[in-house]
Amino acid sequence: MPNKLYVSLILILMAFLTNAQSLEVHYVLSSKIPGNPAKNHDLSLLASSSKMVEGGLELSQEVTTQEEGMLLTIRLIATTDSYINLSGKINLENFSYESTQFYLPGFWYRKNLRSPDKAPNARVSKSWIVREDRLSTPLTGAFNEATNVGVNLVRMDVSEQVALAPLNQGEVILSGPTDLGALGFQEDQVGVALQFSVPYKEAPHTYYRKLTLGEPVTSYIKLAEGEQVVYQYLLNSYDAADYSEFVAKAWSTSYDLMQPQPLTKDEFSNAEIKSTLAQFWKQSFTSLSDGLKGYSGVHLQTATCDVVPLLEVGFVGRVLLNAFNSLEFGYQQQDEGLITISNQIWDSYLKLGFTPGGFFREVVDEYHDWESDVFSIRRQSEGLYAALFYLNFERRAGRSHAEWEAKVKDMLELFAGLQQADGSFPRKFDDQLIVKDHSGGSSSCVVPPLVMAYQYFGDKKYLQMAQKVGEYQEAELINKADYFSSTLDANCEDKEASLYVATSLYYLAQVTRGKEQKHYIQLAKKAAYFALSWYYTWDVPFAQGQMLGDVGLKSRGWGNVSVENNHIDVYIFEFDEILDWLADETSEPRFAEFAEVIRTSMRAQLLPYEGHMVNIGKEGYYPEVVQHTQWDYGKFGKGFYNDLFAPGWTVASIWELLTEGRTEAYFAK
């Protein structure tokens, strides 16, 4: 697939590996007789060669040089009935573990050192191999910081089927054919190697539940006498100035190799999807015992979606953003019912929704008789974001809200007191501004409301605060390729961190010009590649009986969440709009092309409506915690949802995906 990225690819690869004839792959062919421990056969094949293996198996490999890199084709033929697992590794010359940063897209960045010890990271082990369906592209990569050379190994044959497994640890004979393999990396005596396995294995641990590492697993498929399987991997290499450029080139190559296509357009218009989503607001409106009103969108049962008296101002409930969306839609549709309940929410939060110190009452959980007294910069910022959209909408309609404006200004003053000397904001704090978590990885969440406040109030100090965050982001997150701690229920490497950084720079670019604006655009591009690396470029396979497969879910365009939380979801909000903008500003058409994949994939695939309820109890309650790999948030595992979900944020996310041009309209004169 010709592309300008590959102009020097072959020269780089040849310098790295000398030539295709020198490629040596070290294999372990594991054969199993049911009820007995497996026997392992160690083999090494050089270039194009084959070898008979004990037990009536023939292994052959062919190495060909292509414009994209070296294509490794592996063929395994059974001369007797056999149960097998084939794993292999390719040693990387002149790569030491200390100077190498690793990459498993959507799962592993650098050495995962931001993640706790109960999740995969290099403190637990320096070698990992994981199922391909954990990865947004079936790819394993390594970047040598000493030589500025990066190498990727990409699975090229299509994984279309996966078999149900009776066990998740130990030696497991699968219930039928499977294409699903595994990819990873390891430190060994030579230095560093990239590794693969077919069918899948996971070592040194499986990761089958949040913060739960289990025993390793090796799976086996049955090959009948005369049956053969063929697997293909592409080995390619890049020179890159740093890890960020390596990830950017790896994503661009992944996109070109996978060529994800938009889903066939569904039969619904944006307005029709919004009308279905609006059913969530009409069915979830609730009032707590103290009079605070909102939408019940957190801690719901997927099977019933019954109202729970729990209101969350930002993520994951997004009560105030839903209140703005429902108000705007109510006026557009002349729906007096929606207008009434939306205004009731805004009025109740003005009267009852603030703490004595002036922050939003962040989480009010009457269901568990609990209210948060430690606050997050993310939820508080998301509440302000929604409030400023509300105020701007109302002002343009000729309706003024002086009390709300005063509340927003008071909160902005509190934010000024929280901002640190380096421009960052603490992740968590209390009502007396005592910092409870100094981590600055969530600081980007503050930028959109600060820039919006500058536009709304005309006070430059808000822009200056946002610009200081921009300086912090550039120094500590972007330049270090270290995006973390924006997922509220995890503190690790995550998708939302890089996505929020890109979003914050998009907002700064709306109100700046010249060199400063161009600088923000280039920084946003760097962050966008990391955000995109979490989004699937391929469709993971599901087995019959796994509901998500039975309803036909295509995973391309959906994003994995974090190292801790290995599920996909529809967290997108306005990022598609940002990708379209970046495509224009930076002449990178892949951004806009993949934005269309995301848009078509998330619109209605799991939208519950009559005759298409996708195991959700009520229409319009778009699901989350979509479990696409062997991992569960607490219940059910691959092919299903967790039993509890938070449709408050999913409805808000899909709504912004369908509302094109909202941000630019806010900043329009």
Image (spheres, rainbow, N blue to C red):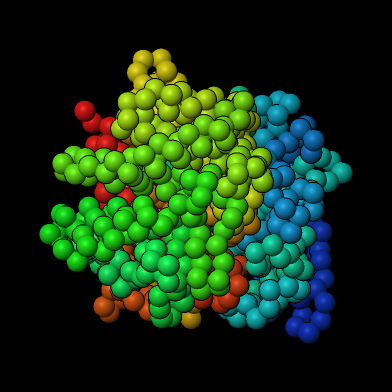
The picture quadrant where one finds residue 146 is top right
The picture quadrant where one finds residue 348 is bottom left
**Left of 205 or right of it: where is 387?**
left
646 shown above or below 483: below
**Left of 417 or right of it: where is 333?**
left
Residue 425 visible? The answer is yes
**Left of 296 or right of it: where is 546?**
right
Q: Residue at coordinates 46% horizontally, 77% vertically from top-left?
A: 301
The picture quadrant where one finds residue 53 is bottom right
Front-most of 41 and 483?
Answer: 483
Residue at the left extreme, as displayed: 334
**Left of 641 or right of it: where is 39?**
right
396 shown above or below 354: above
Q: Residue at coordinates 65% horizontally, 64% vertically from top-left?
A: 210
Q: Residue at coordinates 80% horizontally, 45% vertically from top-left?
A: 187
- Image location (x, y in percent) of residue 347: 31, 56
- Image location (x, y in percent) of residue 620: 31, 69
